[in-house]
Image (spheres, rainbow, N blue to C red):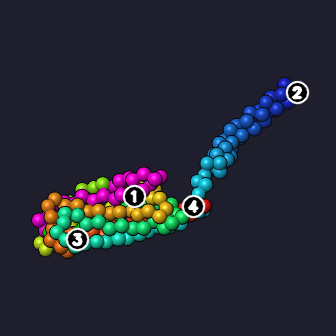
Amino acid sequence: MKKQIVLVIALVAILMLASVSVFAPRSVQAAIATLIRDQDAPGRHPFTATCSAFNSTFASNAQCSMAVPAGQEVIVQSVSFVGMSDPTNANMAFSITATGAGNDIVPVQLVVNDAGTAQPSKANFPGTQLAWFPADPGTNITCGGFIKGEEAAGELGLSCNVSGYYVTLP
């Protein structure tokens, strides 16, 4: 009889240990997730900005800027753009510049080929790029489109859109 009681107790102990090992990882994972969750998530607010420009003189580039509001750090997560130029241009280089952590940065540089959708009257250069970069409060995010050679006034155009979120700084 004593042997059966010891066997039953041992079996119950094994079952309890097995059930703890099955349920413990979930509770441990939940505790870890609570400890490391994103602390600024409640303070994030959507941010989008758009700019456009046409060259006003004989030039090989068009640039436009988007202001970052004072007191708000912006995190850019995507950039979309479209450029237009004379139909003889086969590609356009795009760049985004910003000031992040007090330093000038160029987080996006792309060369885009003519999509052919506006030919034969214009060359059209659309693009989208996922990104992640900060822009300091009170600075500008600048978008530039560059071609080989120069265009007459009004022939070279650019439109840019950035999106992400901002966090209000104390």
Q: Disc 4 or 3, which lies upstream in sequence? A: 3
Q: Disc 1 or 2, which lies upstream in sequence? A: 2
Q: Which residue is mark 2?
A: 1
- Categorize mark 2 by other alpha carbons within 10 Å: few (<14), some (14-19), many (20+): few
The residue drawn where x is 39% and y is 62% is 141
The residue drawn where x is 38% and y is 52% is 105
Which quadrant: the C terminus? bottom right
| CB-based contact (under 8 Å), mark 4 and mark 3 | no
Q: Residue furthest right?
A: 1
The dot on residue 169 is 4
Q: Disc 2 or 4, which lies upstream in sequence? A: 2
As helix, strand or loop, the secondary structure at mark 2 comes to: loop
As helix, strand or loop, the secondary structure at mark 1 comes to: strand
The image quarter containing residue 144 is bottom left
Q: Is residue 103 magenta?
A: yes
Q: Position of residue 145 (x, y in %)?
A: 26, 63
Q: Disc 2 or 3, which lies upstream in sequence? A: 2
